[in-house]
Image: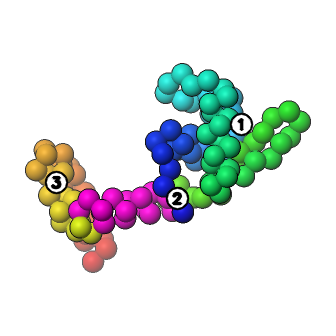
């Protein structure tokens, strides 16, 4: 599975949100920034080429359905980040968050609960 550039990932996140086939106009409504319709269509075409979505034309409207599950993609991306940036060490990752004041007391409690649940 290929890594998506930020622009395509933003489109994909919107598609995953819908949990049903979605068209370009619905995607455009949810975008946080103004992107021209032809640009959105170009991103959607790339997503189709990469195997992330399928397209079904009904009347004059194309409907896009995700072929890759959100959880599957995010899990793979998380593993890649952990491997590349933190030498595959969860401890190094958490330390980087903690040293940067990124972890709150609640975050630490959540991590403890998660670890207990997985143990």
Q: CA distance from mark 2 to mark 3?
A: 26 Å
Q: Residues within 10 Å of mark 1 (few under 14, many from 20)?
A: some
Give the residue at x 53% y 55%.
70
Left or right of residue 6: residue 102: left
Q: CA distance from mark 3 to mark 1?
A: 40 Å
Between discs 2 and 3, the one toward the N terminus? 2
Give the residue at x 27% y 77%.
119
* Residue 94 numbered mark, or none: none
What x and y, as percent, mark residue 65?
69, 49
Residue 107 versus residue 73: which sits nearer the camera?
Answer: 73
Q: Can residue 99 be seen here?
A: yes
Mark 2: secondary structure: loop
* Residue 96 numbered mark, or none: 3
Q: Main secondary structure of the magenta part?
A: helix
Residue hosting label 1: 23
Q: Quadrant of residue 61?
A: top right
Eyeballing the image, is 28 above or below 92? above
Give the residue at x 33% y 59%.
81
Residue depth check, mark 2 versus mark 3: number of the one nearer the observer: 2
Left or right of residue 103: residue 58: right
Q: Can residue 105 be seen here?
A: no
Dividing the image into 4 quarters, which one contains the N terminus? bottom right
């Amino acid at each position: 599975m290929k890594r998506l550039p930020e622009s395509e990932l933003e489109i994909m996140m919107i598609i995953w949100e819908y949990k049903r086939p979605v068209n370009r106009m619905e995607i455009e409504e949810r975008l946080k920034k103004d992107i021209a319709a032809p640009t959105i269509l170009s991103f959607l075409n790339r997503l189709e080429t990469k195997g992330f979505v399928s397209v079904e034309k009904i009347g004059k409207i194309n409907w896009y359905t995700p072929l890759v599950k959100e959880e599957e993609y995010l899990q793979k991306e998380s593993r890649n980040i952990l491997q590349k940036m933190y030498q595959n060490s969860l401890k190094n990752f958490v330390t980087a968050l903690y040293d940067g004041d990124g972890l709150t007391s609640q975050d630490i409690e959540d991590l403890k609960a998660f670890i207990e649940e997985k143990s």
